[in-house]
């Protein structure tokens, strides 16, 4: 009899209706991985930001859905179904089931953990739908999972350089270029969600992984294209990593360039891709005289992407370690102390030291 394998998909989550927007935002901003302040201050800040931002955010969600909700859960379910079907082919002797664990809205991490426990999984693989590791995304989801589920699990921390993942991005980019009429003077902007600069300076490897991925993509698109990385979705007064997506769009539009813009840290269509990239930044491009502006679709259920995820799961099930990247072991250079494999190694070293004493 085969194993019962639970694959837990981590994602951000999104409000189901317009009425859920403010509590969703409150959950987001009271996460200590997002607002790094003592508890009373963090809760006050979360309440203030969610109250102030809710009206504008509601309008953006309403642009995507008549009920004012997010498409993220719907899109994640499609990915979950596609991955489960692919894993059934690759692991024919096992019973594989995918579970969705959203961080800030239903189904919450705690709900997914209870479902996995009730199902009686023999193996649990944690698979973030955040391709690049960040303490603010995968790190936060892992913390929530460890509190909710006490059994053993294997973790895929990141897969930004997985061959099928990179190839799927290039495929989506080239398809968008074809839709745009194959323009010659192209600026390809690879946009990722921004982070406060202080988070990166504390050792978070997210920016390094995004920019290394961008170099890999740049090597596979036409040589005459200008390719650059930019960061979107800034919130609050802190200094964020840059350059900002909006400023880059304005700069290249002023030159009369054809702009292709691709999300490299979002794998599902939701508010940041459909509204921010698809609508708001299009207006910026038109205002500044871009020759054209074409949004590249998120990976969704692209066969290459689903294949990359399935490959990571299969590799995770074969490993002796509890955590892997797409490189197997540690992916990030030694300077990135926020890498979860660096933390794991540090804890192992502490245990050896304590045992020796």
Image: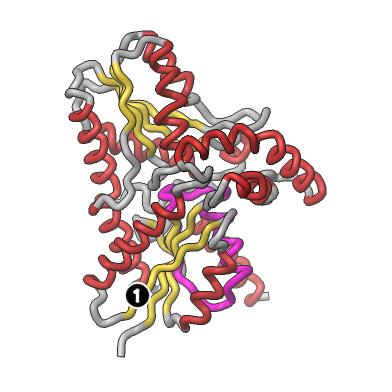
Quadrant of residue 287 within the rendered picture: top left
Inspect the magenta stretch and tell me whether residue 316 lies in it: no
Q: Is residue 126 left or right of residue 261?
A: right
Residue 230 appears in the rendering: yes
In percent of width and height, residue 355 lies at 63, 77
In percent of width and height, residue 113 lies at 54, 71
Quadrant of residue 46 within the rendered picture: top right
The residue at 70%/49% (across/down) is: 30
Seen from the viewer's position, the closer of residues 246 and 79 is 79
| Coloration of the structure image | secondary structure
Seen from the viewer's position, the closer of residues 94 and 331 is 94
Inspect the magenta stretch and tell me whether residue 143 lies in it: yes
The residue at 32%/46% (across/down) is: 299
Relative vertical location of residue 221 with respect to residue 181 in this rendering, above or below? below
In percent of width and height, residue 165 lies at 29, 49
Q: Dividing the image into 4 quarters, which one contains the C terminus? A: bottom right
**Residue at image mark 1:** 96
In percent of width and height, residue 108 lies at 57, 62
* Residue furthest bottom as drawn: 1
* Residue furthest right as drawn: 40
Q: Is residue 285 left or right of residue 205?
A: left
Answer few, some or many: residues within 10 Å of disc 1's Cα (few below 14, many 20 plus, some between 14 and 19): many
Segment tinted magenta in the rendering = 129-157
Q: Is residue 312 left or right of residue 342?
A: left
The residue at 41%/62% (across/down) is: 324
Q: Dividing the image into 4 quarters, which one contains the N terminus? A: bottom left
Residue 338 appears in the rendering: no
- Say which element carries label 1: strand
Relative vertical location of residue 286 with respect to residue 33 in this rendering, above or below? above
The residue at 37%/48% (across/down) is: 160
Relative vertical location of residue 253 with respect to residue 147 in this rendering, above or below? above
* Residue furthest front as drawn: 66
């Amino acid at each position: 009899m085969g194993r019962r394998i639970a694959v837990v998909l981590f994602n951000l989550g999104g409000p189901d209706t317009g009425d859920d927007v403010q509590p969703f935002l409150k959950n987001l901003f009271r996460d200590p991985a997002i607002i790094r302040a003592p508890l009373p201050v963090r809760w006050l800040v979360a309440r203030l930001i969610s109250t102030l931002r809710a009206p504008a955010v509601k309008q953006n969600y309403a642009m995507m859905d008549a009920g004012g909700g997010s498409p993220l859960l719907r899109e994640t379910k499609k990915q979950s179904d596609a991955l489960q079907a692919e894993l059934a082919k690759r692991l024919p002797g096992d019973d594989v089931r995918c579970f969705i664990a959203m961080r800030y809205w239903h189904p919450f991490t705690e709900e997914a953990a209870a479902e996995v426990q009730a199902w009686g999984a023999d193996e649990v693989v944690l698979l973030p739908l955040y391709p690049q590791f960040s303490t603010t995304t995968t790190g936060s989801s892992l913390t929530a999972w460890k509190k909710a589920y006490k059994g053993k699990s294997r973790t895929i921390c990141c897969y930004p350089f997985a061959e099928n993942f990179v190839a799927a991005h290039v495929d989506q980019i080239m398809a968008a270029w074809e839709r745009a009429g194959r323009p010659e003077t192209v600026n390809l902007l690879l946009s990722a969600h921004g982070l406060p600069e202080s988070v990166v300076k504390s050792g978070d490897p997210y920016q390094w992984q995004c920019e290394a991925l961008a170099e890999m993509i740049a090597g596979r698109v036409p040589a005459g294209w200008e390719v650059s990385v930019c960061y979107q979705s800034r919130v609050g007064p802190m200094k964020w990593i840059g350059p900002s997506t909006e400023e880059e769009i304005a700069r290249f539009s002023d030159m009369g360039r054809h702009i292709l813009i691709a999300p490299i840290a979002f794998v599902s269509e939701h508010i940041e891709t459909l509204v921010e990239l698809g609508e708001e930044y299009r207006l910026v491009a038109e205002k500044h005289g871009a020759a054209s502006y074409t949004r590249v679709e998120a990976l969704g259920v692209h066969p290459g992407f689903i294949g990359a995820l399935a490959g990571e799961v299969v590799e995770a099930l074969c490993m002796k370690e509890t955590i892997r990247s797409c490189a197997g072991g540690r992916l990030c250079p030694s300077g990135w102390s926020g890498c979860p494999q660096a933390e794991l190694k540090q804890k192992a070293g502490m245990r050896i030291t304590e045992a020796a004493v």
